[in-house]
Image: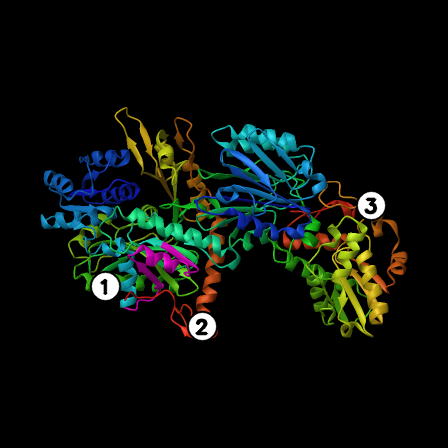
């Protein structure tokens, strides 16, 4: 997953460099290892990494920025004749998308034309994107599949901010105004701001990982508070815990709301069991095995008194390779001396790759695709492992009024409208 | 009865429609800055006519009055008031509805309006300070924090900069912007020699805005239903501040997100300001008066600024709702005989106004000017909606051309917002550009989505002000305690010394 941020200032005098840097900081948790910042520079477009040396950005009224993966940089961005487009995942359709946008922008009613031109992609698997033009226009569009989110916010009378995640809008002192729905976009310039809709796919759904893992706890995704959603799934986990426990904990920071939810229903205290060292880091999004382990080990210094001699429930959002939970189990058993360890996962078993390129998952290293439950318990060295079931996700989708892509969990669409 | 209406825009067209719907036979004359096709047609239909001349000139306007001998003159906008048109007409013996030069200071000078509220301790007042000297203003703005920078004089609603500054990591760039707006305001106001204070800096508040309009003869105050207008140019409350891209009103006198109690406090504030204004300037106020209000966490109903006239698009929103003989009410106000007058308003009906503007408004008006437009007024009428002509001019070739501001307003009403919304969305589609130049309007105004947003926001600030009320700190801004130095005065000093 990556994060896109676009800002247009209506009034003059705003140095957008500050805004871009803090905005990207608020999106850094989404993965992506490389910053790309493009801005209108006179009648041209300039791009860079957004560092302070960025020439001309301080005088630009319009900027599109993103966290991308360096290795695939070229598959996220396309330069048109008078524009640059940044998408939120690689796509073979990107060149076609950009051509369609450029055709539409030559019209006098760009929002109507955009709606028409982009409607041919309604049933295709295309990414969300932001386009910046040399004429000072910004187009943001959320893909018809709706897999990844896109929201629009405003800062007073002065700025519009569009971002993959609401946390970036709020960090910039702006207010979130709308979560764009699938196939919905906005044409934004100093002369006009128009929303448009380019069709309606019956198959639109949000990637479950967005609410499960990717978004910050303080973000709202399609109107759903990530924090409340996670707490709810934590409570649901209660019915799968068959043994009494003394304490509930989770791996910081992602697992905390789940653990708080579970603690509520099993009447065991939630404890802050692990203290991280250095900055927050997203181990699941790391690619190399060594980087991943370093990231895990840095998160997991235990508060020993919390666990010693206790029966412990350890909660996490999902289990990919199991390496985090294996590490947790080893620490709790051997270094701390916990009596029992029960692992609870707030999602169903991960069984396949992401066919849409949103989340990077290698089926050959997915523990629940490769091993049966009792082997997993032995490998992790724990007393029990439980997962949420698909029907739990289904009822959560219903409760929060959304619909999920669960392709990597074995089913394409979960939840209805 | 012969009525002379002064003014050119959508508000005056709304006034014209309200005045000529009287049960009395009305002959309507209009003095306007340009030939507004709606005002021309509607005045001619009554046997009157439109005179195109400078409405800010007391001499020109009075010359028209002398040729017409009206029984009543109604002055719509504020600028003719600021130029003494009302006073001059009164001197010549005409009966005039509209604030005098002295009374209109409540709108013209934002410093005066704020000062008045502090002097008399009127609730809903904001901390502020004002500057005559550029260097003082520049020094102050360095440490001003979360504030609004305004021109001290009303200049068509332009030049107000709201700079939310609540994140220290972005403060440096915001300070630069505040400083630029101070410089620009000083520069802009150097054209107006009538203003001593140049810049007003006041504490920034947030919440739900609405307008409370009243009609008064100086002693009796007749409140109109509240109206919410939508200042942002674009949908989702994005973009530039405009004169208002639309408005809503009803049901009843409050709004769906303003309680009856908040409405009553609002009317009290507006009435108190009117009374103290007259004490202060020692003149009788007769005409329309309005408070641009905001429901804030600080006070509940809070005064943002005042208008010595009806608002636009606020008054248009009341056209379908006012059932009384509006001319009679206005006439009685002008004659000082409003006591006992009643204004019948349809309680169950709500209304929505949508303005249609050429692309380019408000920041690039030149680009938005001079485009031919057409409108199917019959179709709009079939929907039960009214069409108001605003910033459009009828040229000798018989076509209507945009003048760069909001060109038309449609006014639709129904028993609920959903119905009125559907009608308004259809109505705007009958306004078209003849040369392909894009026109825009806000499709979110009147929608359930936006109503819900406002209700949520109102609930948020309501929680805050009620909690302040319970703790007895309503209206108290902040006590500034500097560690190591002790308690110091608020950096925004009010009133001025």
Given residues A118 and B95, the one toward you in this image is: A118
Of the numbered discs in the image, which one, if any, rests on residue B58? none
Given residues B269 and A51, the one toward you in this image is: A51
- Label 2 environment density (alpha carbons within 10 Å; few <14, some 14–19, many ≥20): few
Coloration of the structure image: rainbow
Mark 3, residue position = A363
Figure quadrant of residue B286:
bottom left
- What's the chain of the residue with tag 3? A
Q: Is residue B121 magenta?
A: yes
Residue A257, percent from left and from top: 68, 62
Residue range corresponding to the magenta coloring: B120-149
Residue A209, percent from left and from top: 71, 50
A129 is higher (above) or lower (below) than A347? above
Q: Is residue B133 left or right of residue A196?
A: left
- Of all residues shown, which one is farthest toward the top? B397
Q: Is residue A198 left or right of residue B251?
A: right
Do circles 1 and 3 both sit on a common chain?
Answer: no
Distance between the Cα atoms at labels 3 and 2?
60 Å
Q: Residue at x 48, y 66 (%)?
A: B463
Q: Is residue A225 magenta?
A: no
Q: Secondary structure at mark 2?
A: strand
Mark 1, residue position = B275
């Amino acid at each position: 997953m990556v994060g896109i941020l676009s800002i247009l200032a209506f009034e003059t005098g705003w140095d957008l460099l500050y805004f871009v840097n803090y905005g990207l900081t608020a999106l850094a948790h989404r993965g992506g290892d490389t910053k790309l910042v493009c801005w209108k520079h006179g009648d041209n477009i300039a791009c860079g990494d957004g560092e302070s040396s960025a020439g001309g950005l301080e005088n630009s009224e319009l900027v599109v920025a993103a966290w991308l993966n360096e290795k695939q940089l070229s598959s996220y961005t396309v330069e048109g004749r008078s524009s640059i487009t940044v998408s939120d995942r690689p796509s073979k359709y990107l060149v076609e998308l950009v051509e369609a946008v450029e055709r539409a922008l030559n019209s006098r009613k760009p929002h109507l034309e955009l709606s028409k031109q982009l409607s041919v992609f309604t049933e295709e698997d295309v990414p969300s994107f932001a386009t910046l033009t040399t004429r000072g226009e910004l187009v943001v569009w959320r893909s018809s599949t709706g897999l990844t989110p896109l929201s629009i916010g405003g800062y007073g009378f002065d700025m519009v901010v569009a971002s993959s995640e609401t946390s970036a809008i709020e960090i910039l002192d702006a207010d979130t105004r709308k979560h764009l729905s699938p196939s919905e976009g906005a044409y934004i310039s100093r002369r006009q701001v128009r929303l448009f809709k380019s069709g309606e796919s019956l198959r639109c759904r949000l990637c479950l990982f967005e609410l499960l893992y990717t978004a910050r706890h303080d973000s709202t995704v399609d109107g759903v508070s990530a924090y409340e959603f996670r707490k709810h799934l934590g409570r649901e986990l209660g019915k799968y815990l068959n043994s009494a426990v003394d304490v509930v904990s989770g791996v910081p920071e992602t697992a905390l709301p789940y653990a708080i939810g579970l603690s509520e229903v099993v009447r065991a205290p939630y404890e802050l069991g692990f203290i991280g060292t250095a900055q927050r880091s997203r181990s699941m999004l790391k690619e190399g095995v060594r980087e991943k382990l370093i990231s895990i080990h840095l998160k997991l210094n235990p508060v020993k008194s919390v666990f010693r001699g206790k029966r412990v429930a350890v909660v996490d959002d999902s289990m990919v390779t199991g390496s985090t939970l294996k590490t947790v189990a080893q620490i709790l058993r051997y270094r701390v001396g916990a009596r029992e360890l029960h692992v609870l996962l707030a999602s169903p078993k991960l069984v396949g790759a992401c066919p849409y390129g949103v989340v990077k998952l290698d089926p050959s290293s997915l523990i629940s695709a490769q091993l049966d439950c009792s082997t997993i318990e032995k490998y992790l060295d724990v007393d029990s492992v439980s997962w949420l079931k698909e029907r739990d996700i289904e009822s959560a989708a219903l409760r929060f009024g959304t619909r999920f892509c669960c392709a990597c969990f074995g089913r394409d669409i979960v939840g209805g409208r | 009865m012969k009525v002379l209406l002064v003014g050119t825009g959508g508000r005056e067209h709304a006034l014209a429609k309200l005045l000529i719907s009287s049960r009395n036979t009305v002959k309507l004359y209009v003095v306007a800055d340009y030939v507004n096709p709606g005002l021309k047609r509607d005045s001619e239909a009554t046997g009157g006519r439109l005179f195109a001349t400078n409405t800010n000139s007391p001499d020109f306007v009075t010359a028209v009055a002398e040729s017409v001998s009206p029984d009543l003159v109604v002055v719509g906008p504020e600028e003719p008031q600021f130029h003494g048109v009302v006073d001059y007409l009164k001197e010549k013996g005409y009966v005039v509805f509209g604030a005098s030069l002295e009374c209109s200071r409540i709108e013209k000078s934002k410093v005066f309006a704020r000062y008045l509220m502090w002097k008399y301790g009127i609730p809903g007042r904001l901390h502020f300070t004002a500057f005559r000297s550029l260097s003082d203003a520049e020094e102050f703005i360095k440490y001003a924090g979360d504030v609004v920078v305004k021109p001290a004089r009303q200049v068509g609603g332009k030049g107000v900069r709201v700079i939310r500054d609540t994140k220290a990591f972005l403060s440096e760039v915001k300070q630069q912007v505040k400083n630029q707006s101070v410089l620009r305001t000083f520069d802009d106001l150097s054209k107006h020699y009538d203003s001593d204070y140049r810049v007003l800096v006041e504490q920034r508040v947030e919440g739900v805005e609405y307008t409370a309009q009243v009609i008064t003869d100086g002693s009796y105050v007749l409140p109109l239903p509240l109206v919410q207008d939508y200042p942002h140019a674009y949908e989702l409350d994005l973009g530039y501040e405009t004169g208002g891209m639309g408005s809503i009103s009803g049901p009843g006198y409050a709004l769906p997100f303003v309680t009856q109690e908040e409405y009553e406090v609002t009317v009290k504030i507006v009435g108190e300001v009117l009374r103290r204004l007259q004490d202060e300037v020692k003149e009788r106020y007769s005409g329309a008066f309005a408070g641009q209000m905001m429901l804030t966490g600080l006070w509940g109903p809070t005064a943002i600024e005042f208008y010595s006239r009806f608002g636009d698009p606020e008054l248009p929103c009341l056209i379908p709702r006012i059932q009384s003989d509006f001319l009679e009410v206005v006439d009685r106000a002008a004659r000082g005989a409003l006591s006992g007058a009643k204004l019948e308003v349809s309680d169950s009906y709500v209304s929505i106004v949508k303005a249609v503007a050429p692309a380019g408004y408000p920041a690039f008006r030149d680009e938005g000017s001079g485009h031919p437009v057409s409108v199917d007024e019959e179709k709009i009428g079939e929907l039960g909606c009214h069409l108001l002509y605003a910033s459009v001019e009828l040229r000798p070739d018989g076509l209507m051309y945009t003048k760069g501001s909001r060109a038309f307003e449609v006014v639709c009403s129904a028993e609920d917002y959903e119905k009125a919304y559907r009608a308004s969305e259809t109505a705007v589609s009958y306004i078209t550009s003849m040369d392909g130049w894009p026109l825009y309007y806000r499709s979110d105004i009147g929608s359930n989505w936006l109503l819900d947003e406002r209700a949520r926001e109102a609930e948020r600030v309501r929680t805050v002000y009620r909690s302040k009320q319970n703790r007895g700190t309503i209206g108290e801004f902040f006590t500034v305690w500097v560690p190591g130095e002790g308690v110091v005065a608020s950096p925004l000093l009010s009133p001025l010394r």
